[in-house]
Amino acid sequence: MRILILGGTTEASALARLLANDARFEATLSLAGRTERPAPQPLPTRIGGFGGIDGLVRHLRDEKIAAVVDATHPYADQMSKHAVAACDEAAVPLASLVRAPWTRQTGDEWHDAIDMAAAVEALGPEPRRVLLAIGRQELPLFAGAPQHRYLARVIDAPAGVALPPQLTLLQARGPFDLAAETDLLRDHRIDLVVSKNAGGDATYAKIAAARALGVPVVMIARPDKPAGHVTATPEEAVAWLDHVRRSLRGV
């Protein structure tokens, strides 16, 4: 049974490892290509977009894909919209591996922002030292608030875009532990963190470090992200795939 995993997350990689040696499935992992040097994967991997909904429909049909698992990032809403529409048109079962969001804990000082533009506005007029833990795509938006000193942690450095004038780039790939995140905030005298509510464990340490140090966090809300059959773990996704496999075989 041929499977397509829409990936780019730790959960997608975990699912790939589960399926790599599972004789029931022939799986391919698809990555958007936003990271120049993605981590090695145990499955055949394709890089790049499909060309919209129509392109994804063609891929599903041409490759005889029997089921799709959307394990994209919680903020990859456009890809999920395309997956839902394409799987519906191609009559291919779709599961969505949905990572639970972080929730406020005692001691957290979160300021909610509905989107990235609202996060920029939330920084206020007074100069601050800000950790941008948002990836590289939206960094240019913060050029509109040039009074702040920014530390941005990215996997790949942005190129060809206008960036904030007082910006230091730190290239690193998670996961990050609490001690390192605490040192990072202290060493750079960070007094505000801007973060997406990514959920999961890989990047949560910065939230715990901010709590421990009394550093406020501007937390950017998740976009509306359509989904297929919702699964919470890679193991649940494998169980769903086996259910689909049995259904197709009439077992």
Image (tube, grey):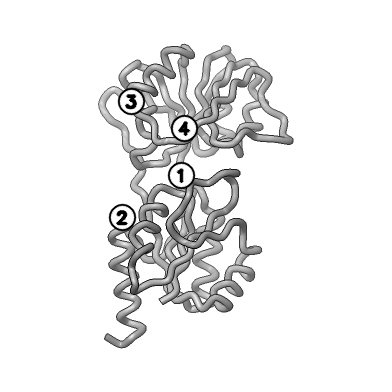
Mark 1 vs mark 3, foreground winner is 3
Nearest to N terminus: mark 1 or mark 3 = 3
Observer-nearest of 116 and 30: 30
Rounded to the nearest whole Å, what is the CA distance between mark 4 and mark 1? 11 Å
Of label 4 and label 2, which has the lower sequence position?
4
Could you tell me residue 227's position as x and y percent? 43, 61
Write down the residue under mark 3: 178
Q: Who's the residue at 65% across and 34% down the image?
A: 158
Q: Residue at x 58, y 73 (%)?
A: 57
Q: From this view, report whether residue 107 is shown above or below residue 74.
A: above
Residue 97 is situated, as x and y percent measured from the top left of the image, at 38, 57
**CB under 8 Å between callouts 4 and 2?**
no
Residue with the mark numbered 2: 233
Q: Quadrant of residue 123?
A: top right
**What's under tag 4, amino acid-wise?**
Ser
| Element carrying mark 1 | loop
Figure quadrant of the C terminus: bottom left
* Mark 3: amino acid: Leu
Q: Tag 3 or tag 4, which sits nearer the N-term?
A: 3
Q: Earlier in the sequence, mark 2 or mark 3?
A: 3
Which label lies toward us, 4 or 1? Answer: 4
> Depth check: 158 or 222 in front?
158
What's the mark number on residue 222? 1
User: Quick check: 58 above or below 209?
Assistant: below
Going from N to C along the chain, the mark reached first, 4 or 1, is 4
Please tell me whether mark 3 sits on a helix, a strand or a loop: helix
**What is the tally of numbered marks visible in this picture?**
4
Q: Give the x, y percent position of residue 202.
A: 37, 38
Q: Amino acid at mark 2?
A: Thr
